[in-house]
Image (cartoon, rainbow, N blue to C red):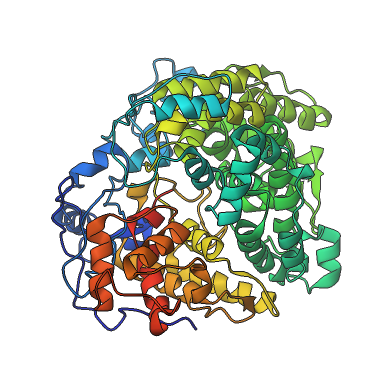
């Protein structure tokens, strides 16, 4: 078990930090809002809970920029810790169904949904719902349409050069080196080897290589995956390897996610696999996924992560994991289950802004009837369960007369949704949120959406346009690492590698991510983990993140190859001041500010000009290195 830091100090709550820019910052580290909401009051579950939330106070002013704050060092027992960026309680929102249900009565009664009249034909958009879940967290911030540079260059490297000549609208503590910026966003964290490779081959060539992952050797991740063999098995192999209902394959899949994120050479692929696993979320483990969740990851998400979204969507609609997860297995013409039909519109394609209404949801569910999963874990289309009759969803309409044609009609509908302009905008905006900032410039979103449509929903051209956009390169420091990303980035930069008992170590690592509030594939609802800073806030999460930094630096993960702390500084350093510069460059790829370095020197109880004769600082290096990782520099991506 990793050494725990500060857990014996419950009374020392995060204090307000007086900073030049953001004096209202509380020092909290992101944690899912759902984990920190107060419990309902049994006497008055509505108003009492709302009052508690209001009592938390308004969101800090710095949230208007959609990015974490810069701030000075804490002046207490933690004075040597460089405080992390954080978030605040975000506004909640009614679900789209609830919003639509309270809309005005339709003008034409014949258009009302058969299951009820009233608001059935009011779209969630017109009813005032947030355009998506992340938008509910960033409400009031608006789009950051001016980051300091905009437009498109011929190549990513040309865009990087142009952006470097511009002045960012929002200050950042991070080094604006484009190689570091690229690696923070297109990987799960830079390593010295990554930096050296990009500088050797160039930004353009590295991006080209990452967009063609089949040609990138991946020996370390391949070796690590041998510790979790069921994660890459087919359904048939899983069923022959474990007992019926045994979730071993689902658990090993979550460990495989960690292994690939930490050790894969195909980092951009892993970033996009994470993106799509959240977009087409099927949590792991889930009831009914014991034999199908791993094959879903392989055959739907990984196979199409850099291909066409239309192919991925159609594949997901023919996958037993998705059918079980969203209850389409229980949907038939006599008893239509709307879960999958609704999520197709709200989460997977056009989004709430797409303009659909409750009648569209019902027709969407009609079109998907007959798609089910067998007891053997395979997809099956059962024409006897398919609802027939004329259907219309947005601009798609079909007579839908024959149950034999139901699968083909459904595929045509899915292709329509995948290539819909609203889907293009929805996917483009989510990509901009992942790679640029929490409230991205509308001009960039429009540019990517246009590329998406022109390419027939192909993802690689959209990413190429993203990397050629000046907005991407000017956005240094405008994203916060979520807890899992911070955890993985720490393993990568410290140099932790697979070892003698990788299987046991991956289990321990996974268990620790549960404490962070973000286990891989662990988000239960179908909308996937949020990807904006304001969705995460918890002092407990901050402490667990600090504990993780100490565990990695201290080599406390049994079964892995944990480099010794004194290997972090290999070049000679005559004085402590120079030594700390070298250490900072090794861990955060840039020097600290003078006052931050002075805090570390004071923590060590010596002077800057003290001569260094021991790379381990007399045993104190395992205490100093984590302090640098606790800083805002490591908290941002």
> Measured along the vertical axis of the image, is residue 475 above or below residue 479?
above
Q: Can residue 123 be seen from the camera position used here? A: no
> Measured along the vertical axis of the image, is residue 61 above or below residue 366?
below
Measuring from the top left, give residue 124's x and y in whole percent: 41, 30
- In the depicted view, which residue is nearer to us: 194 or 142? 194
The residue at 80%/37% (across/down) is: 383
In the shown orientation, is residue 186 left or right of residue 429? right
The residue at 66%/32% (across/down) is: 309
In the shown orientation, is residue 6 left or right of residue 259? left
Quarter of image, res 436: top left
Quarter of image, res 501: bottom right
The residue at 26%/49% (across/down) is: 70
In the shown orientation, is residue 406 left or right of residue 540? right
The residue at 65%/22% (across/down) is: 416
Measuring from the top left, give residue 554's x and y in whole percent: 48, 78
> Measured along the vertical axis of the image, is residue 432 above or below residue 226?
above
Q: Can residue 122 be seen from the camera position used here? A: yes
Measuring from the top left, give residue 591's x and y in whole percent: 36, 54
Instruction: Count the marks.
Output: 0
- In the depicted view, which residue is nearer to us: 171 or 93? 171
- In the depicted view, which residue is nearer to us: 378 or 533? 533
- In the depicted view, which residue is nearer to us: 40 or 579? 579
Measuring from the top left, give residue 177's x and y in whole percent: 45, 40
């Amino acid at each position: 078990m990793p050494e725990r830091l500060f857990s014996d100090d419950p009374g020392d709550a995060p204090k307000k930090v007086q900073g030049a820019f953001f004096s209202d910052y509380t020092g909290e580290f992101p944690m899912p809002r759902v984990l920190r909401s107060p419990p309902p009051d049994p006497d008055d579950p509505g108003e009492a809970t709302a009052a508690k939330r209001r009592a938390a106070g308004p969101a800090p002013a710095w949230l208007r920029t959609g990015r974490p704050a810069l701030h000075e060092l804490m002046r207490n027992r933690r004075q040597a810790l460089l405080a992390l960026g954080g978030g605040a309680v975000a506004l909640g929102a009614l679900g789209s169904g609830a919003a639509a249900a309270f809309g005005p009565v339709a003008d034409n009664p014949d258009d009302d949904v058969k299951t009820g009249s009233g608001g059935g034909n009011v779209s969630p958009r017109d009813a005032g719902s947030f355009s998506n879940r992340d938008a509910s967290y960033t409400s009031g911030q608006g789009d950051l349409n001016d980051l300091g540079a905009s437009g498109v260059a011929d190549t990513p490297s040309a865009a990087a050069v142009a952006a470097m000549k511009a002045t960012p609208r929002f200050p950042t503590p991070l080094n604006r080196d484009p190689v570091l910026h690229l690696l923070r966003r297109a990987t799960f964290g830079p390593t010295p080897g990554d930096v050296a490779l990009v500088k050797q081959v160039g930004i353009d060539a590295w991006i080209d290589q990452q967009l063609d992952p089949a040609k990138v050797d991946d020996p370390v991740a391949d070796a690590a995956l041998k510790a979790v063999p069921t994660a890459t098995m087919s359904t048939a192999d899983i069923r022959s390897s474990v007992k019926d209902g045994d979730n071993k394959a689902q658990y090993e899949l979550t460990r495989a996610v960690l292994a690939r994120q930490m050790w894969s050479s195909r980092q951009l692929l892993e970033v996009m696999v994470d993106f799509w696993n959240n977009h087409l979320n099927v949590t792991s483990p889930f009831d009914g996924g014991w034999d199908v969740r791993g094959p879903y990851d392989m055959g739907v998400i990984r196979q199409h992560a850099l291909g066409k979204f239309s192919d991925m969507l159609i594949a997901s609609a023919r996958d037993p994991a998705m059918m079980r997860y969203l209850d389409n297995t229980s949907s038939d013409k006599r008893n239509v289950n709307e879960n999958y039909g609704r999520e197709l519109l709200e989460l997977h394609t056009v989004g709430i802004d797409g303009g659909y209404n409750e009648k569209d949801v019902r027709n969407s569910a009609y079109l998907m009837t007959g798609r089910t999963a067998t007891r053997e874990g395979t997809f099956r289309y059962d024409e006897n369960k398919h609802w027939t009759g004329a259907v219309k969803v947005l601009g798609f309409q079909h007579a839908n007369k024959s149950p034999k044609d139901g699968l083909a009609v459904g595929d045509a509908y899915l292709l329509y949704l995948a290539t819909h302009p609203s889907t293009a905008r929805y996917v483009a905006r989510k990509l901009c949120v992942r790679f640029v900032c929490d409230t991205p410039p509308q001009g960039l979103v429009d540019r990517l959406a246009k590329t998406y449509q022109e390419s027939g929903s192909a993802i690689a051209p959209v990413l190429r346009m993203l990397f050629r956009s000046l907005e991407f390169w000017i956005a240094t420091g405008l994203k916060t690492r979520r807890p899992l990303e911070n955890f993985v980035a720490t393993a990568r930069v410290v140099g932790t590698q697979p070892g003698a008992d990788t299987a046991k170590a991956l289990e321990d690592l996974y268990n620790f991510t549960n404490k962070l509030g973000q286990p891989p594939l662990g988000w239960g609802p179908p909308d996937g983990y949020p990807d904006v800073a304001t969705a995460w806030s918890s002092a407990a999460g901050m402490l667990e993140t600090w504990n993780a930094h100490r565990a990695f630096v201290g080599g406390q993960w049994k079964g892995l190859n944990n480099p010794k702390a004194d290997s972090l500084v290999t070049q000679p350093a005559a004085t402590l001041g120079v030594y700390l510069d070298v250490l900072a460059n090794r861990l955060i790829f840039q020097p600290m500010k003078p006052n931050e370095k002075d805090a570390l020197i004071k923590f060590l109880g010596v002077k800057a000009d003290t001569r260094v004769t021991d790379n381990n600082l007399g045993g104190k290096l395992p205490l100093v290195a984590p302090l640098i990782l606790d800083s805002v520099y490591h908290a941002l991506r």
